[in-house]
Amino acid sequence: MGATSGVFLSGSIANTLLKPEDLDTFRTHFKSSATMQDLLKIIPVSLIKDTNLGSKGGLILASKG
């Protein structure tokens, strides 16, 4: 049991501070845990560049009533 659908880094801090090469470094360190390596190596890590994610989510929820 666990959250294995992925790690999604988003928001202005992630978009401002992370460059593509930093994301590769993050992925490498994330997946290198000695105790959880078998699990972590199958979990995708992504950087979401969309800076309006919160607004879009709010609009979707509002449209559902």
Image (spheres, grey):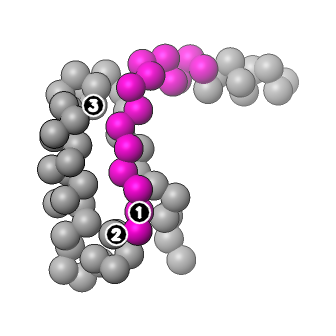
**Which of disc 3 and disc 1 is earlier in sequence?**
3
Residue at image mark 3: 14
Q: Which residues are magenta?
A: 42-56
Q: Position of residue 48 (x, y in %)?
A: 41, 32
Decide whether residue 15 is among the magenta residues: no
**Residue drawn at the location 38% of the way across and 44% of the way down:** 46
Mark 2–mark 1 distance (CA, rounded to whole Å): 5 Å
Mark on residue 40?
Answer: 2
**Residue drawn at the location 40% of the way across and 68% of the way down:** 42
Give the residue type that dot 3 points to. Answer: Ala
Please report contact status of discs 2 and 1: CB closer than 8 Å, yes or no: yes
Residue 56 appears in which quarter of the rendering? top right
Give the residue type that dot 1 points to. Answer: Ile
Disc 3: CA contacts within 10 A as few (<14), some (14-19) or many (>=20): some
Residue at image mark 1: 43
Q: Position of residue 22 (x, y in %)?
A: 16, 40
